[in-house]
Amino acid sequence: MKLNGDNLPKSSGIERISNEKLTWINIEKPTREKLKMLELHYPFHELNIEDCLSKLQIPKVDRYGDHVFIILHFPTMENKEGFPRSSQLAIFVGYNYLITIQHGNLRALTEIFQICKIDQNQRSSFMGNSSGYLFHSIIDLLVDDLLHMLIKVEGNLDDIEDLVFNERIAIAKEISLLRREITTLKRLVYPLKRTILTVSREIQKFSEEDLTLYFDDVKDHIDKVIEVLDESKETIEIFKDTDFMLSAEKTNKILAILTILFTLSIPATIFSTYYGMNVNLPGGIETGAATFLGPYTTFIMIILLSIIPTGAMIYGFKKKGWLEF
């Protein structure tokens, strides 16, 4: 015969809260010993226990006669890079208990659990009188926390919008990192929506109160998250294309300037090269130094021969509008 969760030994290190007949157990960084202790006191399948130990489970809902086992994934920002990572949350929901098992750091869930331990009013408000209502409260809390993450994403979008037209700043890396962040959030939110739609029908049997309106509110919040992510994805793609076009235009301008400078240097290069060769030219090596314009006649001739075609090219380029940058 399975024992009640209140009979879990204190030496197990498993934290729990009770509100009337409802027990909430929260386990962070689960170990095999703690989960085996749960298995002794609750009718959980050993495969579900193994799923709780793994960090790589896909979102799912397993239905049993007296409880439901759920795996969800939520994003967290608790890392040095400030980049969203997937945190797995496994939940057992029974008639008079709810057990949450975290992989990662769902700070909002941990904080509310600690608050409920010391604040009776908060405990009654958050947990309610049924495990179905408590499940809704937890999901609603984590979805609201997800909305707060979107505020950061939208702030980053505004920053990039201000910088994308600044030619002195390269923001290709910032755009790529934000695209990665938005893609990661979308990859987590879409399965979350499907799983919540599925589990909301199963959870009702654990509550005498009609939870339809509560879960409809959660679905609206998730839809809002998806809408914001879709808009953010579209916006960042526009910024990416804009940055690419502006970078290409800047590169083309630089290449055009360098090409024109190289082209204008061709006459001087050609004439100075000819005067350094054994070719009969006025003032060249074979004919001897020219002096009809003074001792620097050869130098003056090279300069004039270089300036005249260069000036002609500048005039032609300007007439065609090639010198307007």
Image (tube, rainbow, N blue to C red):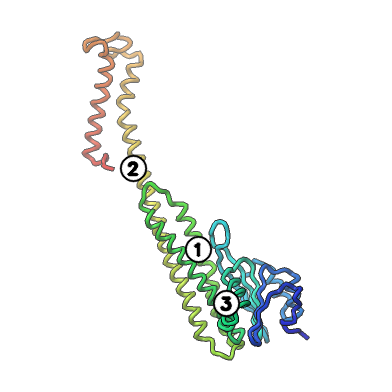
Q: Quote the CA–CA distance across marks 2 and 1.
A: 34 Å
Q: Quote the CA–CA distance across marks 2 and 3.
A: 56 Å
How many marks overall?
A: 3
Q: Residue at x 30, y 8 (%)?
A: 288
Q: Label 3 near label 1: C-beta < 8 Å?
A: no
The one of 12 and 197 positioned closer to us in this rendering: 12
Quarter-of-image position of residue 286: top left
The one of 102 and 182 positioned closer to us in this rendering: 102
Residue 10: percent from left, percent from top: 75, 76
Q: Mark 3 points at which residue?
A: 138
Q: Which residue is drawn at 34% across and 36% down?
A: 259
Q: What residue type is labelled 2?
A: Lys
Quadrant of the drawing holding the C terminus: top left
* Mark 1 / mark 3, whichever is N-terminal: 3
* Mark 2 / mark 1, whichever is N-terminal: 1
The one of 58 and 208 positioned closer to us in this rendering: 208
Residue 267: percent from left, percent from top: 30, 26
Give the numbered dot on residue 227: none
Can I make out residue 181 in this image? yes
Q: Mark 1 points at which residue?
A: 183
Q: Label 1 near label 2: C-beta < 8 Å?
A: no
Q: Mark 2 points at which residue?
A: 253
Residue 42: percent from left, percent from top: 73, 81
**Looking at the image, is 79 positioned above or below residue 205?**
above
Can I make out residue 198 in this image? no
Name the front one of labels 1 and 3. Answer: 3
Residue 49: percent from left, percent from top: 71, 74
